[in-house]
Image (cartoon, rainbow, N blue to C red):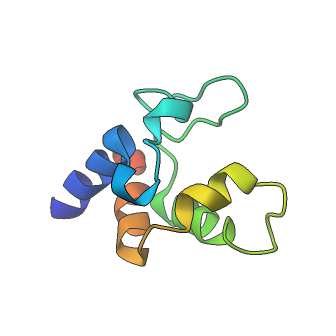
Amino acid sequence: MLMLSVGRTLFVNGAPDRGVRACASCHGAGGEGAKVFPRLAGQHADYVLAQLKEFGTALRPHALVMRNEVQALTADEMRALAEYVQSR
């Protein structure tokens, strides 16, 4: 349950002290997606975690917005976010 709480906090509030915006600000309050931002709600946690990790690599060169968002997240925070969006 702690992981879901951490994930929810990051999703809703981000981590402004580290320059991480709230996921909800682009992906919608419920993770439903908005305009060019994909739906996150209900995605499998392992898939989301893999994507979060890839954003920081050359495998996703056009994902500059997300690269900036994930660079300040720890591995545990990425896992927490992935588990939270799966639970939505």
Q: Is residue 15 above or below residue 38?
A: below
Q: Quarter-wise, where is residue 69 in the image? A: bottom right
Seen at 79% across and 64% down, the residue is 60
Q: Is residue 48 above or below residue 73?
A: above
Q: Classify the position of the N terminus by image quarter.
A: bottom left
Would residue 21 be found to the left or right of residue 33 on screen?
left
Residue 51 placement (x, y as % from top left): 63, 63
Q: Residue furthest left?
A: 1
Would residue 72 be found to the left or right of residue 47 on screen?
left
Q: Residue furthest top?
A: 35
Residue 21 placement (x, y as % from top left): 47, 45
Task: State how many labels appear.
Answer: 0
**Front residue of 30 and 47:** 30
**Front residue of 25 and 17:** 17
Q: Is residue 63 above or below residue 38?
A: below
Q: Is residue 5 visible?
A: yes
Seen at 69% across and 23% down, the residue is 35
Q: Residue furthest front?
A: 17
Residue 80 placement (x, y as % from top left): 34, 62
Seen at 51% across and 66% down, the residue is 46
